[in-house]
Amino acid sequence: MRNRSSALVMTLYLLFLMVPIYWLVNMSLKTNAEITGTFSLFPRELTFRNYMVILTDPSWYMGYVNSIIYVVLNTVISIAVALPAAYAFSRYSFMGDKHLFFWLLTNRMSPPAVFALPFFQLYSSIGLFDTHIAVALAHCLFNVPLAVWILEGFMRGVPKEIDETAYIDGYSFPRFFIRIFMPLVASGIGVAAFFCFMFSWVELLLSRTLTSVNAKPIAATMTRTVSASGMDWGVLAAAGVLTIIPGALVIWFVRNYIAKGFALGRV
Amino acid sequence: MDKTQNNRAWFLVLPVLVLVAFSAVIPLMTVVNYSVNDTFGNNEFFWAGLDWFDEAVHSDRIHGALVRQAMFSAIILAIEVPLGIFVALNMPKKGFWSSFCLVVMALPLLIPFNVVGTIWQIFGRGDIGLLGHTLAAIGIDYNYTSDPFDAWATVVVMDVWHWTSLVALLAYAGLQSIPQAYYQAARIDQASRWAVFRYIELPKMKGVLLIAVLLRFMDSFMIYTEPFVVTGGGPGNSTTFLSIDLVKMAVGQFDLGPAAAFSIMYFLVILLVSWVFYTVMTNLDRQEAK
């Protein structure tokens, strides 16, 4: 009996989650005439025109390319600097470690709106405005602390004896770190990378402020479907569906670590 | 784990320090600079002291945004936390369906913020959206672009849709860590369902729930993109939250001084809450280590 009511609750909740997404997919497969003209729960005249518009027009698909470039750059930078730092936090106590760890957390918590204008001026003044690297560096603001916290959570689980044994066996620190330690926390690195990727991918405020043409992210491109001939709802919906796909593809691999990632490595 | 005292660990932290200092401290100092200066263009600045702060503290506009923000955060916490716990309690414990639920629930969390806004903007429209259309069909007058109450309802439901899964996932992770023996003991004692929840599950979930509440509080406190896409802060100012107001002030009207003073106070609130978060969390870590 209890099982059946649980199943009912879950079904209702999952439906609540899926229906708006379904509606977006549904719209992306309709023609504009059908969207505005008739009301139907599924596309009557199935069309892929909306997707074709995006995949053939450079001003559309370059948005995806730009987003992917800065997201990947950001993930690589974040993980590269976070790895040694997380190791230091998990293994050593040093002067000011707690304060530093806390300061990192405040950056994850700080509102991007506060940083939008100063970032714009900072990156304009050093000539990086409208480049991929500018957005990648700006997103480090919240992704580096996140990566440090998640990795520290995973590294605490690795017994310290492993480090000591490796040093006795004559490993130097870099060799030990790359050869022995990194494989041991591989799942942690994967999860941290996933979360850096995700948070950089979903962020719009900073990436829109820091770009105009050359590095414009897909999220900002989506706002231009308002044209003289009215809204192009179908293309807007198709663009939305395409932004959901990267997350949907990799989520299966990290499903058991999702809670840990969102909780900053603290579950 | 006991840690070795070693100040050379600073070298390992140095890259992070430099990078985050570049992307956090320098911009923050610019903001501080603006907040105490006045400008008439041409990059000429005049010392303004604390005038901007004074103005910001007494500004009705900022008070309004703050009240709306506090109301919004309170409402979504009051809905999402109980609902999230409820969902977590009903999740299948293991097997394929457990993984399936995890994946579907995580999906809204991974959608770009503006796409979340777009989804709900479309979904709520009376002419082409399923929700708006259905509500109109059963005779409810619903229009989120002109009615403040409907706009609020849409933004709140959207946030519940977007983030309840986060609370549920964390609560679920907490539940998974409870050993079966606890439940068996409760069965022997013939504990009621409520007693099991109150004395076994809730205390065990305390740590993760705390993280969930604080994350939800922080993230809802700086929410920008989703309501901006759906309502643009309207109708009127009824859904203009702190971040929306700040961006409007800084980038839209270029009122650098007041915007900067506003930013700093905003940031201090965040700092305070982060500190509470951190203290409580490290205390919990210490308790667990015992």
Image (cartoon, coloured by chain):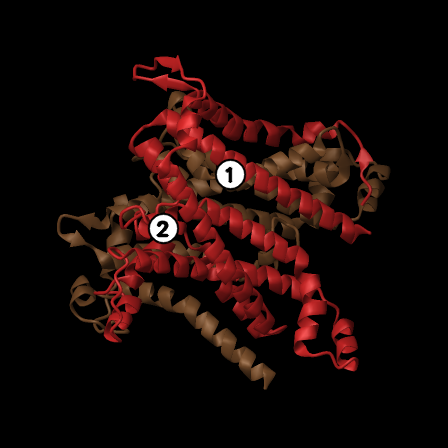
Chain colours: A brown, B red
Instruction: Report how far apart the C-alphas of labels 1 and 2 lie in the structure.
Output: 19 Å
Write the residue at 34% across / 49% down: B239
Q: Which residue is outermost to the right?
A: A168
Where does the image place residue A259, in percent across and percent down from the top left?
59, 57
Q: Residue furthest left?
A: A229
Residue at (36% x, 60% y) in the render: B153
Q: Which mark is residue B85?
A: none
Q: Which residue is mark 2?
A: B227
Question: Can see residue A194?
Answer: no
Q: Do callouts 1 and 2 point to residues on the same chain?
A: no
Q: Nearer the viewer, residue B18 or B276?
A: B276
Which is nearer the eye, A257 or A98? A98
Looking at the image, residue A106 lies above or below residue B184: above
**In what quadrant of the picture does the N terminus of chain B appear?**
top right
Question: Is disc 1 surrounded by few (<14), some (14 to 19) or many (20+) residues within 10 Å?
Answer: many
The amino acid type found where label 1 is placed reads: Ser
Q: In the displayed structure, does residue A206 sit left or right of residue A86? A: left
Q: Which residue was labeled with disc 1?
A: A110
> Would you place residue A220 above or below residue B79 in this image?
above
Q: Residue furthest bottom?
A: A1
Q: How many C-alpha atoms fall within 10 Å of the one at disc 2: few (<14), some, or many (≥20)? A: many
From this view, report whether residue A28 is shown above or below residue B37.
below
Q: Looking at the image, which is closer to me, A2 or A258?
A: A2
What residue is drawn where x is 48% and y is 30%? B264
| Residue A124 percent across, percent down from the top left | 37, 24
Residues at circles 1 and 2 in contact by the CB criterion of under 8 Å: no
| Residue shown at 18% from the left, 62% from the top | A32
Where residue B200 sits, quadrant-wise, is: bottom right
On the image, the x and y values in percent for residue B119 come to: 34, 59
Residue type at numbered disc 2: Pro
